[in-house]
Image (tube, rainbow, N blue to C red):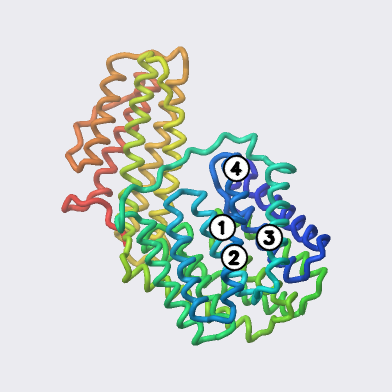
Amino acid sequence: MSPDPGRSRLRFAARAVLGIGLAVVVCGLAGTSLVGAVIGGLAALLALFTVTDATVRGQAVTTALLPVAGLPVLTAAAALHDHPVARDLTFLAVVGAGVYARRWGPRGHSLGVFAFMTFFIAQFLHATTDRLPEMYAAVLLSVAAAAAVRFGLWCYERRLSPPAVLAPPAGTGLARITTRQAVQATAGAGFALVVGQLVSEERWYWAVGATWWVFVNTTSRGDTLVRGFRRVLGTVVGIGLGFLIAVPLAGSAAPTAVLAAVCVFGIFYTAAVSYTWMMLCVTVLAELLYGLLDFLSPGLLALRLAETGVGALGAALAVLFVLPVTTHAVTDAWIQRALRCVHACTAEAAARLAGTRGADPAPRVAELEQLLGRVRLSVAPLVHPLNPMYGRKRRARRVLALLDDCAREIRGLVAVAADPEASHDARLAAACWRVETAVEALTGGRPLPARADGPGAAGPALAHLHGLERALAELATPLRTPSGSPLVGA
């Protein structure tokens, strides 16, 4: 039901079905067993899902590096199959390293996820060293097949403008969010591993996987808790569907393949808009794969729910008590960056209107859209229906609405500035100065300057600047509590 501008999610999902289907066929033609086909399909899924570099060239490089990150981990997992203590410690090290790698941006994130999932899949398939040659071949063939579809057969990204790339939040040591999250994820995974093994000596890795995926694409305590709730909800609904769909199939090849393709489509189509729906599709896909491997039973589904609960609990305990990163800290940082971008947009537009050669606010507008997207993600826990703090919820919604107003006025101002007939006058210069001063006051905690009255018919550029002034002035109230501190989060 969510909007799909340019049908980007539809193309993303359809290409995934094609790429993963081709990978499974290639593995079958190469003579791999069912286990080889499964690991190949999952490797292709990860290659198509996790690689998110801004440019096609960057995506191709990251895809080529996936086996470099995954095959050594697969080797370690298989070699340590009969050495539980060493295996568990290595798994925790992979968790920590995988999360820490996010400090290097999308490529580090992709390689970290692939490395973790390779270890996870090795536990899922009970990989041993005698199976390594077949698994190596399946991974390499599948990544190559996925790359052939993504960069050869259907590379729709070549026709799109590359998105603005946001620099990661600054910081060193434990002040860096990715470092704190690496410690949190390792601690949460350690809890999940120990308790998960008490629940089941065979399927304990489900709990570790649940903890890992709760931490993916989260940056704060509130965000992680909401994601954990959504994971459990999606798993519960998916297990219910499993009783209706996967269990009766009992591993029948043809209908299982069709439903697996539907689940893959659902994973890719819903990932950007609903983690609950994505987890529902992931759960049903896992049940179908277990049916193919002849492991599926009602008891196994109940066990998956229990292990998912353990993993979500591990993530919750970690973010609450191990180097917590508050929603307030993350939200405030992104809002500050968005406001500074408003300042830069206004300055560039003013220079363009004044006739300065080379002044171009368009890239700043693209950056502002990216920053507002991050603000919405960080504020999501505050506006979640289950958040009991209604005052904060109302204030957060007001901040989002006013930031959207700022973005709308900036887009209008930039559109006017792009008009070659637009001219500059003293009123525009004064209005731009007031906007820039208002942003500096908001980000510096100082009183805002007096706002000019009436914009009206003085011209479209001046009207947008007055609208921007109004939105910034109104932002001062929800961004600051009576004591003068910024918007407080969870």
Query: Dot 2 corresponds to which residue?
Result: 118
**Res 447 → quadrant:** top left
> How many numbered circles does the render carry?
4
Q: Do the residues labelled 1 and 3 touch (CB within 8 Å)?
A: no
Residues tagged 1 and 2 counted as in contact (Cβ below 8 A): yes
Q: Which of marks 2 and 4 is in front?
A: 2
Q: Nearer the viewer, residue 373 or 15?
A: 15
Q: Residue 5 carries which label?
A: 4
Residue marked by disc 3: 139
Q: Is residue 15 above or below residue 282?
A: above
- How far, Cα to Cα, is label 3 from label 4? 33 Å
Badge nearest the viewer, 1 or 2: 1
In depth, the one of 376 and 228 nearer the eye is 228
Residue shown at the point (42%, 67%) measured from the top left: 185
Q: Where is residue 380 in the image (x, y as percent from the top left)?
A: 42, 56
Looking at the picture, does residue 220 appear above or below residue 368?
Answer: below
> In the image, what residue type sits under mark 2?
Thr
Circle on res. 69: 1
Q: How crowded is mark 3: few (under 14 residues within 10 Å), some or many (20 or more)?
A: many
